Amino acid sequence: MRWALAICAICASAVLVATRFYLPGMVTVGPAQRAVLSEGGAVVSLLDPGLHAYNRATQQLTIYDAHVSQQLRVRGAVMVEDCPADVTVTYNIGDVLVFHQSGGNADQIAAMVSTIRGVLADMDLRLDTPLGEAMNAVRQELREIASDGMNISHVAADLGECAPPPPRILTDRVERLPIELGGVLGAQRADMPDLELFMTDSVRLQLLNAVATYDVVDPNLSATCFGERGADTIVTDFTAGRLRYRLASYPSTELTTGFEAVAEALESEGADLVEQCGVEVGAIDVSDAVLWRIERVNCTETPEAEICLEAD
């Protein structure tokens, strides 16, 4: 009898030890998300959208939103005279694995917050002075420190209740520009929103009537990745992000080179969507698109400007 009890005790101990080192867990990775599975500090695998099993006792999961625009709002990032101004950074994670290995959300957000405060601390900002130049300086610094897996697309300031009454601003379409976007169009089409694009020499562009294209190469994987809403939303957001980010690295005198960089980015960075979601991003259809160089005209300061008089 004692031997039987001893054997039972040993078996129970074995079960407890086994349970201690294996706790079954399930996780659902949503559309437009990726999860990094780690064990002992080392990456085990990158999980695509869907239901996955893992060991909760020894493995860790970090879920990221991928290929979609995200925003970081730093409240009270800088004092403009006596008013605290918030700064909002728009970014997206292109390469989840590289981003994770660079420290992930915690490290990157801490670095961005520190950089924003550091850049603005030395600037003498006034309520009656546009903050666009200061935000451009912040954006350039953020791009210097950002992880290789991360794209910074836009930085904006918000003075809240301290902001002066908004001036009457009109958009003047100064010049129609050629669009030279090559590449192979996909069979599926998704209308893109009207986009305002910024070049390094402060030239603003407005792109109208562009269409994102793509092909579904794996319907089952695509349905798992995007769900009922389909791929349109993610593809247009991804395509618009490549346009904004790549063109923002060139002056207006190198517009053709900028468009070439956009085409290359859609092909190279879009490879992730093929592997992970069964969708191949095609070129942007610009057959009916119009590209304008635009200027913002402050009709409060210059009511005599032609566009202001025409609008009255």
Image (spheres, rainbow, N blue to C red):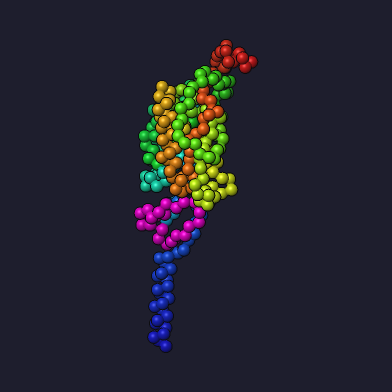
Q: Which quadrant of the figure contains the N terminus?
A: bottom left
Q: Which quadrant of the figure contains the C terminus?
A: top right
Image spot of residue 300 (x, y percent): 57, 17
Image spot of residue 54 (x, y percent): 45, 60
Point out the stretch of residues depicted in magenta.
37-59
Task: Identify which residue is drawn at 53% across, 49% down.
Answer: 219
Decide whether residue 38 is among the magenta residues: yes
Image spot of residue 9 (x, y percent): 41, 79
Please determine whether, in this image, residue 171 is positioned above or below residue 3: above
Task: Identify which residue is drawn at 54% across, 40% down.
Answer: 188
Image spot of residue 159 (x, y percent): 52, 29
Image quadrant assignment for residue 125: top left
**Depth order, front residue of 215/106:** 215
Residue 285 left/right relative to 41: right
Please determine whether, in this image, residue 197 is positioned above or below residue 51: above
Identify the main secondary structure in magenta: strand
Outermost bottom residue: 1
